[in-house]
Each structure stands twice: as structure tokens, then as C-alpha cells.
């Protein structure tokens, strides 16, 4: 049956949509994709490991297929199983969510070889941005400002010392194949450089099977500010403003907001337009995020993620643009539904990541949710697959859900977040909820005055009680 996306129909565009979308993921993002499919009237297939048979994304999908045992490499990362699931359900497109196979260019190619559409960027762009050295070179070529550092991989200690003499200490040694903050080491002096190089190399080799590393100037107190982009692979691309994700622990984001308290309209428009223009030149397709560190009024590119991100809802709340729906539309061959002039920002949004972890030690806390009461009311969105009686399996990441709150102003947003956090009840497992309840009462957070090390310093003071 031929289907037309409702908004395309309304605009008189007779675009043919997919017959059926298989969601190659689990948890809240599988549910998020499923919701977009339902709103487009497209049937869905959920896949799951044996550990996720009772998961909400499985319950809400039109069809489901068990693709293997609990370990991700045997289920959610198992390409032959996923292909078989597409074949038996006649799915003609796959949405990969985030993590798992979402940035696997080979997976996208294999799907194409089977006439199945990968709902994401072109394989060459996934590959380009997956190599952080190539990504940085490309960014520089496209006029995006980058962190000063080595021009490519450093092959010897002598070469590293020569570059260090040029850019100065402190330096950061980073893995070319990096991700999740692994393979990253600081050297504060020439004496520390050989050890930092050796440790980063061995960590990178163990985590990614690739020990190539490069050097970057270590910025002391920057903010992490990222720009959301959308492109249709037909030369059209827009930016949807920024997200400030400076509140991190061990390079993992926990609390994100948009707009950033550190940017004004002129600064946002400038960096946003630079990034959007770069995406037009690349002919980028789908959603993507260009990540920067921001210090003393200057932006420094660090990487680009070629997928939908965990924190995408804060952008959706202030733009009223459904990012997942747009990913699906452009993958089906439609043009972007908006131009840059159509993108309007209104109000303020904050997201808190509710992880099943002890809020002091951050030790994972899988198990049965005995009581679950999500908050509601104006401006509150909860993206979660949790329900009373749900057992969080120990095999995957610890994200239980995301609380996203919108307000007309940052102050209204913070007050709303505070009351929403107070309404939220989750019993049976430990979560990061006490951390957020403490954060919304903290003067630096209320003032928006924080940087990428702020949260770890706050935690080190013993500011949160478990
Ligand atoms: P990964 O791909 O491993 O997540 P990123 O390059 O995205 O690595 O960096 C993750 C985090 O590490 C950043 O958000 C920031 O907190 C820190 N970081 C990265 N590069 C630098 C740098 N040059 N100076 C200071 N901190 C950095």
C-alpha cells in the first residue's frame, strides 16, 4: 500500500512512504521511533533479545521478532538476524536509533544491498565522521573552527613532543576511533606526555581495535555546546540551534538544555549558519549533531555524530520539529519540510537522564521497578519504556527514561522541572533522581554558570545524598 506522510499530503506533496519500518534498537529510543511511525501511519516491527521480551517497545509495536540471546553482539548488533527479521516481516526500512548499529556504515550498505532503506545518513558520511581525525580535517576544510592540535595521527613520541612544543600544555591525547570518552588522556607537562600517549593507545586498541591517536589542546573550563542539523541529501540543510550538554560525569552527559545560557542570538546564528552551510556542501542527509567546546567566546569543533542523539527532545521542545519524523521523511526521498527561515525558537527546555544507577557511586542498579509514577502537567514530557513491574535487565545501558521540561523562560522551565522531579516516583531500583533534585536547587545551575568539569567537582564535594 502506498502511504503519504500527513504533512506532505497537507502540503500537496504526494511522497510515497515506507510500507513497514523495523526498529533496530530497544528501550526509550525504540519507543520514540515507534511513536513517530505511528503518527505517520507506518506499521512497525520491534526486535528484541530474549532479555527484552516484556519490554514496552515490543508490546506497542505491530509485530515483534526475537533476534537472539541477551548479549548485544548476539542480538542488537547481529546483522544477519536483523536482515532475517526484515525479510520475514517484509520491512522495507530500518531505523537504528542511537548506539548499537546506528553509526555502522557497513550495516547501512548491507541494508541497501538488500533493497532496505537505512533511516540515517549516507554510508560515506557515517564513515567520514566516525574517523575523528578525518572529521576534524573535513570540518576545517568546510570553515568550521577546530581545537588546535596535531594535523593527523601522531606516530611517535618525538613527533608528539614537537607538536606539544608548538601548541603548549596541557594537551589531550585522543583516540582517532574514539567514543564514550575512551582512549582520552591529559598530559600537563612534557614529562607526562609519553605515559599519556602509551595509555591512550592501549585503551584505544582495547576498545576499538585501532591504536591511532592525535593531540589536541586541552581546554580547561569550556562548555560543551552542540548544534543540531537536519539535511535531506539534496543540498538542503538547516540548523535547529544548540544544546548545552556541559553537565557531564566521565564524559557522559546527564543534563542538557537549550538554549545555552552562554549564547546570545548573534552567536547562535553565526555558528549555526556556519554548520548548516557545511552540511549543504557535504550534501548531508538526516539528523546529525556537530559538537563543539566553547570557551571565552570561541567555538572549537570536536566531533560530529551522524545519528539521532539521546538529548534530541530538548531541540524538539523549543522548535516544534519532530526530528525522528523528519529523518523518516528524508530517508523516503522527501525534501526537508522547512527552510532556515521557518525554524523558530521558543522558550526553554531541559532534559534529565534518569539512569538506574546509585546517585553517589553511579554503580548500575538493574532490577524490578516496584512503583513507577511519571510526572505530568503543562510542559512535561517523559520518554521512557518503564512501567510498574518492569525488570531492567543488566545487559544494556542504564538509561531508564528521560524527563524533558519546557517553559516560556529558563526560570519557568527550572521551576517546572523542580516540581516534575518532585512528582516522579520510582521505587525498587536506585536512580539518578536525587542528583537532579539537588541540581535544580544549586545556585550555579540556577544561574546557568557551569562548565564541563562543574558536575564532577560538585559530586566530589559530596553534594548528593543517596
Ligand atoms: P567521545 O567521542 O569519546 O565522546 P569527544 O571528542 O566527543 O569524545 O569528547 C567528549 C568530552 O571530552 C567532551 O564533551 C569534553 O568534555 C571532553 N573533551 C574533548 N576534547 C577536549 C579538549 N580538547 N579539551 C578539554 N576537554 C575535552
Image (spheres, rainbow, N blue to C red):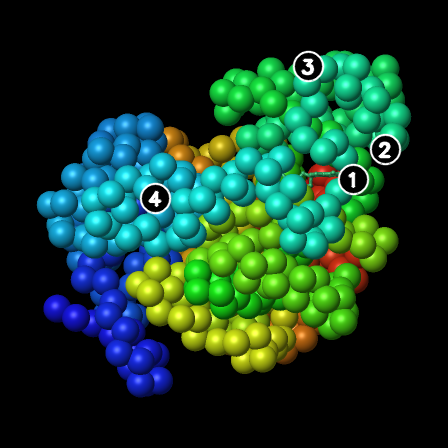
Question: Would residue 120 be found to the left or right of residue 320 on screen?
Answer: left
| Residue bearing mark 3 | 198
Q: Residue at x 72, y 15 (%)?
A: 156
Point out residue 379 in the picture as x, y percentages from the top left corner. 52, 73
In primary-sequence order, the first of circles 1 and 4 is 4
Query: Disc 3 or disc 4, which is closer to the eye?
Result: 4
Q: Residue at x 39, y 31 (%)?
A: 394
In primary-sequence order, the first of circles 2 and 1 is 1
Q: For the C terminus, give its image quadrant.
A: top right
Secondary structure of the residue carrying numbered label 2:
helix
Please determine whether, in this image, residue 184 is positioned above or below residue 408.
above
CB contact under 8 Å: marks 2 and 1? yes
Confirm if mark 2 falls within 8 A of ligand 1.
Answer: no
Question: Would residue 366 be found to the left or right of residue 163 on screen?
Answer: left
**Separation of marks 1 and 4 at Cα, in angstroms:** 33 Å
**Badge 2: how crowded within 10 Å, few (<14), some, or many (20+)?**
some
| Residue bearing mark 4 | 108
| Residue bearing mark 2 | 167
Give the quadrant of ligand 1. top right
**Separation of marks 1 and 3 at Cα, in angstroms:** 21 Å
| Residue bearing mark 1 | 148
CB contact under 8 Å: marks 3 and 4? no
Residue 392: which quarter of the image? top left
Secondary structure of the residue carrying numbered label 3:
helix
**Separation of marks 2 and 1 at Cα, in angstroms:** 7 Å
In primary-sequence order, the first of circles 3 and 4 is 4
Query: Disc 2 or disc 3, which is closer to the eye?
Result: 2
Secondary structure of the residue carrying numbered label 1:
loop
**Separation of marks 3 and 4 at Cα, in angstroms:** 34 Å
Query: Disc 1 or disc 3, which is closer to the eye?
Result: 1
Amino acid at each position: 500500500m502506498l502511504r503519504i506522510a500527513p504533512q506532505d499530503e497537507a502540503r500537496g506533496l504526494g511522497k510515497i512512504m515506507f510500507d513497514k519500518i523495523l526498529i533496530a534498537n530497544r528501550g526509550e529510543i525504540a519507543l520514540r521511533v515507534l511513536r513517530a511511525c505511528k503518527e505517520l501511519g507506518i506499521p512497525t516491527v520491534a526486535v528484541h533479545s530474549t532479555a527484552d521480551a516484556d519490554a514496552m517497545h515490543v508490546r506497542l509495536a505491530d509485530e515483534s521478532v526475537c533476534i537472539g540471546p541477551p548479549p548485544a553482539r548476539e542480538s542488537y548488533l547481529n546483522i544477519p538476524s536483523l536482515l532475517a527479521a526484515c525479510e520475514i516481516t517484509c520491512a522495507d526500512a530500518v531505523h537504528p536509533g542511537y548506539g548499537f548499529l546506528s553509526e555502522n556504515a557497513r550495516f547501512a550498505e548491507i541494508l541497501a544491498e538488500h533493497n532496505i532503506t537505512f533511516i540515517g545518513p549516507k554510508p560515506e558520511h557515517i564513515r567520514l565522521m566516525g574517523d575523528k581525525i578525518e572529521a576534524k580535517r573535513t570540518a576545517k576544510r568546510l570553515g568550521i573552527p577546530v581545537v588546535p592540535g596535531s594535523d593527523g595521527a601522531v606516530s611517535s613520541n618525538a613527533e608528539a613532543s614537537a607538536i606539544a612544543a608548538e601548541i603548549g600544555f596541557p594537551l589531550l591525547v585522543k583516540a582517532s576511533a574514539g567514543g564514550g570518552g575512551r582512549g582520552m588522556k591529559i598530559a600537563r607537562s612534557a614529562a607526562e606526555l609519553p605515559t599519556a600517549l602509551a595509555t591512550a593507545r592501549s585503551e584505544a586498541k582495547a576498545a576499538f581495535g585501532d591504536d591511532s591517536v592525535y593531540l589536541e589542546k586541552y581546554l580547561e573550563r569550556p562548555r560543551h555546546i552542540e548544534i543540531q542539523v537536519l539535511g535531506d541529501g539534496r543540498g538542503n540543510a538547516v540548523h535547529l540551534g544548540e544544546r548545552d550538554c556541559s553537565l557531564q560525569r566521565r564524559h557522559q552527559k546527564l543534563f542538557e538544555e537549550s538554549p545555552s545560557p552562554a549564547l546570545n542570538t548573534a552567536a547562535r546564528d553565526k555558528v549555526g549558519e556556519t554548520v548548516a552551510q557545511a552540511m549543504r556542501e557535504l550534501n548531508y542527509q538526516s539528523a546529525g549533531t556537530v559538537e563543539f567546546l566553547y570557551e571565552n567566546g570561541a567555538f572549537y569543533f570536536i566531533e560530529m555524530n551522524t545519528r539521532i542523539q539521546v538529548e534530541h527532545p530538548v531541540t524538539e521542545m523549543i522548535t516544534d520539529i519532530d526530528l525522528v519524523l523528519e529523518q523518516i521523511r528524508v530517508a523516503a526521498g522527501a525534501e526537508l519540510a522547512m527552510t532556515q527561515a521557518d525554524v523558530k525558537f521558543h522558550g526553554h527546555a531541559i532534559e534529565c537522564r534518569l539512569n538506574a544507577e546509585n546517585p553517589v557511586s553511579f554503580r548500575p542498579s538493574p532490577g524490578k521497578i516496584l512503583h513507577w509514577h511519571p510526572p505530568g502537567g503543562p510542559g512535561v514530557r517523559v520518554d521512557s519504556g518503564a512501567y510498574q513491574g518492569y525488570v531492567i535487565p543488566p545487559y544494556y545501558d542504564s538509561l531508564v527514561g528521560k524527563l524533558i521540561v519546557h517553559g516560556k523562560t529558563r526560570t519557568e522551565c527550572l521551576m517546572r522541572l523542580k516540581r516534575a522531579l518532585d512528582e516522579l516516583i520510582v521505587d525498587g531500583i536506585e536512580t539518578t533522581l536525587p542528583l537532579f533534585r539537588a541540581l535544580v536547587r544549586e545556585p550555579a545551575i540556577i544561574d546557568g554558570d557551569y562548565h564541563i568539569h562543574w558536575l564532577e567537582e560538585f559530586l566530589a564535594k559530596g553534594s548528593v545524598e543517596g
